[in-house]
Amino acid sequence: MAIDISTSICGVRLANPVIPASGTFGFGLELAGSLGLDRLGGISLKGTTLEPRFGNPTPRIAECRGGLLNSVGLQNPGVEALVSEKVPALRKVYGGCVIANLSGFSLEEYERCAGIADGCEGIDLLEINVSCPNVHGGGLAFGTDPANAAAVTAAVKAVTHKPVIVKLSPNVTDIVSIARACEDAGADGLTLVNTFLGMRIDITRRRPVLANRMGGFSGPAIFPVALRMVHQVSKACSVPVIGCGGISRAEDVVEMAMAGASAVQVGSENLRNPFVCIEIIDRLPALLEELGASSFKEIIGCV
Amino acid sequence: MERRVLTVAENRIVAARTHRLVLEGGGLPTVAPGQFVQLEVEGFYLRRPISVCDCSEDSITLIYKEVGEGTRSLASLAEGSCADLLLPLGTGYRLPLKPESVLLVGGGLGAAPLHLLCKALKEAGCSMRVVLGFNTAADIVLRDEYKALGVEPEIVTLDGSEGAKGLVTDLLSCCPSMDSSSACKQEGLSQEGSGAKAERFYTCGPLPMMRAVCGMLTIPGQASLEERMGCGAGFCYGCTIHTASGPARVCADGPVFDKEDIIWQ
């Protein structure tokens, strides 16, 4: 019997649960010539802001054992270019779930950005980034306080008819309280987690490796922490959770699902192996069968 | 871009801390001059971008220097073992539309991508002057490979241990038929021997060298830039720099840029 690996997030059906995470797959089109985009359950597009941004100076990437740090700093062409150029171009080659990842530096910016994205037919879901550690005075500042996270969620919900997912930061004392605040404010789903604030020092030059000094740490090393947070939040909240953090193989996807994730996002691993999402999708049915499951949905939250 | 697992046919020292890595496999995609590969290195999370020195349908040659932990690990890659790489990556050198007289200026391992370029320019019927600069005689690489292409590279070393002493720019400013560097600027470069002027230049090497070369030559030219990369394939935006044409990803929009586009730091 064929194993059904489809899933759904906030009423949107996904052919499979694998979504490249925002910031690790560009706007999708960058990879259209190299791999079969249509195989992907969804694509979370690069973080977008109201105005175009260059981002941070280089070096923006540092390596470490078990992962990497980035301080890209939300380089993007702005939400107008997203809806008029990036999404329509992607839609010509991709029929799956398109997730626009939006960020801002004030409530008003989040609101205006979401309002513009709301008018774009090609976007299925809005993912609100309240957790970017690489920009000052925005992003993360909204994601580390329950009241602020709730305020952003409510503001975005008020200007869109599309389902709203809030992407949470792991750089908090109690992620459950933030998750609950977002759910109470109307979030239709939650993505857990964004990167951990980290740093590397070049010992020969006695200075930080990253030009921005600090950056977001991601990769296989964060997987157990992300999994724990997905587990805690999915038990405490009733909205669907997208598991994200250190996923690099089909086994990790199954673990995330068992912890409560309805779908997953694969991030850093794309930088090592741009074909990893496809490889995971290829492997998933056989793995589920080996584990005695008849579908992906069946294992969601079983632990 | 493809992901390929190739066999290490050769990984040996060819100059001071400098290795030649030859990887073999069938039906390799075409790599254009100036393009690079992302090579997986045992024990390290990110791949290492390395420019391509030579390639054919069934082999690819890379030259790398042991500069850090990653390249040290690469040096221990045994012949017969496997290497996982992504290729081809980046936007390489733009070849002239018709045969021209061209100047190639390399510094250190910059000689490597220029070798593949030299091969392509030769096939395109271009005449060439190749100037290569190294710190010292022990660092010199690829001289025989250039000779095999019918080009005698002019060598300059910083310490004078081989060839002329000084910088590549010293050779460029000493054109046989010119009195000074300002004359070169106005007239273009004289090609040694023939006296034909170079109509275009290509450079790869340390940033200060390329900045000086681009600054002194008035003919059209391109330089290959380096930046710390993440994906190496244009989708993580980890290596974006400012250019005269706007933000550009060194890995995908480059690494080769027109000199007019480069904003020197």
Image: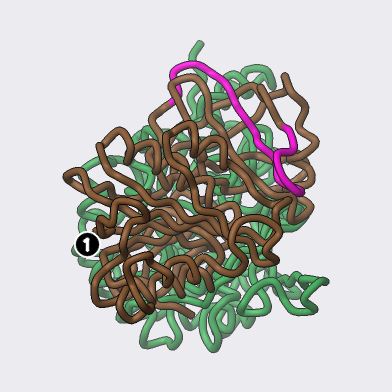
Chain colours: A green, B brown
Please state the chain letter of the residue tagged with numbered disc 1 in the rendered image. Answer: A
Residue A300: image x %, image y %? 61, 39
Name the chief secondary structure element in magenta.
Answer: strand
Q: Is residue A201 above or below residue A279?
A: below
In the picture, the quarter occupied by the N terminus of chain B is top left
Instruction: Determine if residue A22 is in view.
Output: no
Q: Does the stretch in magenta take in B83?
A: no
Residue A286: image x %, image y %? 59, 18
Which one is nearer the viewer's eye here, A211 or A164? A211
Magenta highlight range: B12-28
- Residue at 58% across / 41% down in the picture? B142
Q: Residue furthest top?
A: A1
- Residue at 78% across / 46% down in the picture? B72
Q: Quadrant location of residue A250? A: top right
- The residue tagged 1 is A120
Instruction: Determine if residue B172 is in view.
Output: yes
